[in-house]
Image (cartoon, coloured by chain):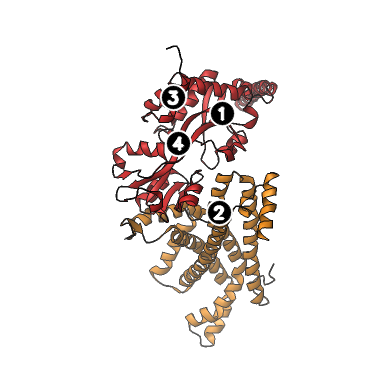
Amino acid sequence: MISLKTLAFALGVTFMSTAMGTAASAQSMECGNDTLCRVKAAGVLKIGTKDDYVPWSYRASDGTFKGMEVDIGKKIAEALGVKAEFVKVTSANRFEFLAQGQIDLMIASASDTAERRKIVAFVHPNYYSSGYTVLLPKAVKATEWSQIAGQTICSVQGAWYNKPAQEEFGVKVLAFAGTAETEAAMAQGRCIGLLEDDNMINVRLSSEKWADYQMPLPIQADTPWGMAVRQADQFAPFGYFVAGMITEMHRDGELLEMEKANGIKNSAFLIKMHDALKDHIN
Amino acid sequence: MITEIQTYFRELAASGINLTIFYDAFDFDRFVTGFGNTLLLILISAACSIALGAAGAAVLTLGRGPAPAFIRGYVALFRNTPLIVQMYFFYFAVGSIMPVGRNELGLPQPLIGSFSWAIISLSLYAGAFNVETFRAGIGAVHGSYEEAALALGYNRRQAFFSVTVPLALRFSFASLANNLVDLTKATTVAYAVGVAELLYVSNQIWSDSLNTIEMMNVMLVIYLTLTAAVVFIINRVEAAMRLPGFGLGDGQ
C-alpha cells in the first residue's frame, strides 16, 4: 500500500513539475528571439564570469562568486528583477559559452577587439580598460621590453596578449590553465615573470606577498574591456538594456564605488568615463 | 606555390572557414612546433614505456624477494591514479624539490623542464599498462615450452629469454597496440604543464583567432591520422614476426 501511495505521489509531483515546466517554456517560447523577455520569464540571468581573477571575479571561501564584475552582474540582474546566476568561464571558452547560449551576458574581463567582434557583440560603452605588461622580481633589472627578449614568461592560456608579446617582443610564453598554476610556475623559476594585464599587477603589488616584485616595463596596447551579448541581442531590448545600465553606472559613479569596495585603486579609464558622462547640473 | 596556398586559405577565411595555420606565418610556425613536440612525446614515451613494461614483466616472472613486490606497487600506483594528477604531481610537487641551476639573470631555474616531466610522467603511466600487457603475453605461453627448454639443458633465465619471451611478444601485440594508441591520445594531457604540443598550440590559436570549430576539426583529423599510423606500424611489426599458432598473427 505504501508503495502505491509513494507511486501516486511521485506521479503527482512529475505531473505538476511537467505542467509548471510547460507553463514556463510556453512563456519563454512566446518571447521568440527576445532575450530580455526570456530572461524575465525564466527569472534568472545567466552571467559568464571567471573564478580566478581576484578582485574582479573570483570564488570566495564559501564557494560563491565575488568581485567587481560580480557586483556589476548582480546590479544588472537586480534592475531586471531577476536572480543572477554566475557561470564559470575561462579565457579560452567564454565566447563559445555565450554564442551557444550557456550564458546570456558575459562579464569576464574580455578586451574588446576586432577579432572578437566577429563572434559576439560587445555592449558599449566599455566598462573597464587595461593593457598588458610583466610582473618581474626586483632582481631583474629591465626597463625596456627589448631587455627581456628570449626570456620565458608565464601566462594564462587564451589571454589575448600572448600572441603580441611573442610576436613583437620575442619573449617565450609558457601558458597554463589558470592563474594559480602560473604563480606556482614562477615561484619554481620556470619563468622570470608573469605576463598579465596592468590592473591585475597593480592589485598584486598592493599586497605584502608581492613586495619583492615590480612592473618596470611600459604598458602595451591599452584596450577597453567590454561586456558581451550574442550578436542578435546587440540592437535588441537586451543589448540596449545592458548598454543603458553601463552608462548609468558610469554616470552616477557607481563603477568607481565598486572599484573602491573591491580594493582597487580608481583607474584612469573609469575617472575619464565618469567625467564625460556625469550630470552637468550638479 | 606557398603564396598561392596562402591566398587560397585567406579567401577561404573570408567565406567563413578560417584556417589561420595555412596563411598566418606566426600561427603556422607554432602549429608546426606543436606537431613536432607531439610526435616527440609519442616516440620517446612509447619507447620508454615499452622498455619499462618489458623490464617490469621480466622482473615479475623471474625476480625473487622485494623486486616483484616493488613492480606490483608501481603498477598499482600508476595504473590507478589519473594521468593529469600524476603530471601535476611531478611538475609542481616533485619539481619543486629538485635541484635548481641559475639562468643568465642570476635567477633560480629548474634543471628539468616541462617537456622532460611530461616524458617521465607519460612513460611511467603507459609503462604500468605495458607491464601487465607483457605479463599477460608471458602467461599465454604454455609451460611445456619452458619445460622442453629446461630438458634440453637451458637454465631458467636462458629458457625465459630464448624461448618464452619471443613467443610471449607475439601474444602481446593486440594489447600493446591498445596501450600505444591510448598513449598517443594521452600526450594531450601535457598541455596542463605548459608543453607546447598540439592541443596547447591549437588552444592558443583559437583563443587569438576565435576559429575554435576549424581547429577542433584539424585536431580530430591529426589525431586520427596519428593513431592510425601507430596501429599500422604495430601491425607491420606483428605481420613481420608472424609465427603460425602464436598470437593473432594476421595483422588485423
Q: Secondary structure at mark 3?
A: helix
User: Nearer the viewer's eye, disc 4 or disc 3?
Assistant: 4
Kind of residue sitting beneath label 1 = Val
Q: Residues within 10 Å of mark 4 (few under 14, many from 20)?
A: many
Q: Secondary structure at mark 2?
A: helix
Q: Position of residue B181 (x, y in %)?
A: 59, 61
Residue A77 or B136: which is nearer the viewer?
A: A77
Q: Which mark is residue A123?
A: 1
Q: Name the residue: 51% across, 85% down.
A: B154
Q: Which mark is residue A130?
A: 4
Q: Which mark is residue B26?
A: 2
Q: Position of residue A27 (x, y in %)?
A: 67, 20
Quadrant into which the N terminus of chain A falls: top right
From this viewpoint, is residue B148 visible? yes
Q: Secondary structure at mark 4?
A: strand
Q: Name the residue: 48% across, 50% down.
A: A168
Chain represented in orange: B
Q: Chain of mark 4?
A: A
User: Nearer the viewer's eye, disc 1 or disc 2?
Assistant: 2
Residue where numbered disc 3 is placed: A255
* Residues flagged by tags 4 and 3 on a common chain: yes
User: Nearer the viewer's eye, disc 3 or disc 2?
Assistant: 2
Q: Position of residue A218 (x, y in %)?
A: 39, 43
The colour chain A appears in is: red
From this viewpoint, is residue B141 visible? no
Kind of residue sitting beneath label 3 = Leu
Q: Position of residue B26 (x, y in %)?
A: 55, 54
- Separation (CA) of disc 3 from disc 2: 39 Å
Residue B46 or B37: which is nearer the viewer?
A: B37
The number of discs equals 4
* Residues flagged by tags 2 and 4 on a common chain: no
